[in-house]
């Protein structure tokens, strides 16, 4: 215990967790650094009040997992299901993540600061980026079908290979954001314009 009576979390470093199911018995509370979670299942379980520093989640299922007050600092998610995950409930002070080939449908990044985040080959169906700061982020080959951008900071964001997006330039900041010529239609959808 520390001087204030709180129990300090154990420190776990450079450990690989493979094929574990944490749906019935949650992952022990700890500070995890440089750890790899591979093919682990957290689905609809509890991952709250955890600290993850420079950890990797590979082929994991975190669908609807409780991540309240959890720290994800410099974490990487690959080929993982993060459906319905409420990242807005995480500890927002140190949040920094990158995603590759992940399903982030129905996830919420509401009002987070996620500058320079990479989303590569991800499905972001109805994902919520309302009031999120995504400055300098990159959506490479991402499906943004019905993704919510509202009062979102999209300055210098690269959408050149993203598809199925609809972004209202009047309701978002788009300074120096990059789009392909084919993608420009995604900025005009609200006007119901036919481009021939």
Image (cartoon, rainbow, N blue to C red):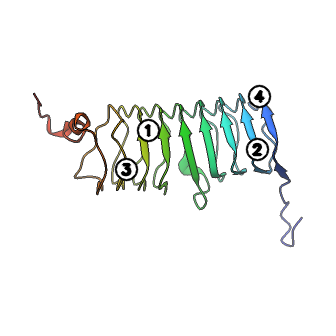
User: Mark 3 sits on what residue?
Assistant: 157
For numbered disc 4, what is the local secondary structure?
loop
Q: Closer to the camera, 3 or 113?
A: 113
Please name which of the two marks, 2 or 1, marks the residue nearer to the observer.
Answer: 2
Q: Nearer the viewer, residue 193 or 119?
A: 119
Identify the residue at horizontal 60%, vertical 52% (top origin): 90
Mark 3 or 1, nearer chain start: 1
- The span from disc 2 to disc 1 (Cα, nearest Å) is 27 Å
Disc marking residue 21: 4
Q: Which sits earlier in the primary sequence, circle 2 or circle 3?
A: 2
Residue at coordinates 12% horizontally, 34% vertically from top-left?
Answer: 193
- Locate residue 174, reporting x and y percent: 29, 54
Q: Quadrant of residue 38?
A: top right
Q: Could you tell me how far apart the alpha carbons at marks 3 and 1 are, in whole angstroms? A: 17 Å
Q: Position of residue 150 (x, y in %)?
A: 33, 49
Residue 127 is labelled as: 1
Which element is circle 2 on? loop
Mark closer to the chain start, 2 or 1: 2
Q: CA distance from mark 4 to mark 1?
A: 26 Å
């Amino acid at each position: 215990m520390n001087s204030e009576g709180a129990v300090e979390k154990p420190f776990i470093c450079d450990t690989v967790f493979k094929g574990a199911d944490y749906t019935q018995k949650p992952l022990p509370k700890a500070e995890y650094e440089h750890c790899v979670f591979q093919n682990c299942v957290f689905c609809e379980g509890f991952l709250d009040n955890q600290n993850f520093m420079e950890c990797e989640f590979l082929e994991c299922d975190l669908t609807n997992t409780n991540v309240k007050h959890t720290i994800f600092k410099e974490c990487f998610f690959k080929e993982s299901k993060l459906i319905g995950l409420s990242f807005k409930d995480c500890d927002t002070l140190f949040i920094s993540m990158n995603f590759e080939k992940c399903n982030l449908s129905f996830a919420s990044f509401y009002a987070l600061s996620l500058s320079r985040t990479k989303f590569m080959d991800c499905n972001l169906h109805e994902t919520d980026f309302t009031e999120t700061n995504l400055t300098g982020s990159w959506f490479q080959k991402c499906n943004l079908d019905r993704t919510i951008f509202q009062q979102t900071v999209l300055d210098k964001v690269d959408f050149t290979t993203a598809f199925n997006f609809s972004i209202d330039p009047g309701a978002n900041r788009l300074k120096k954001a990059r789009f392909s010529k084919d993608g420009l239609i995604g900025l005009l959808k609200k006007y119901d314009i036919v481009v021939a």
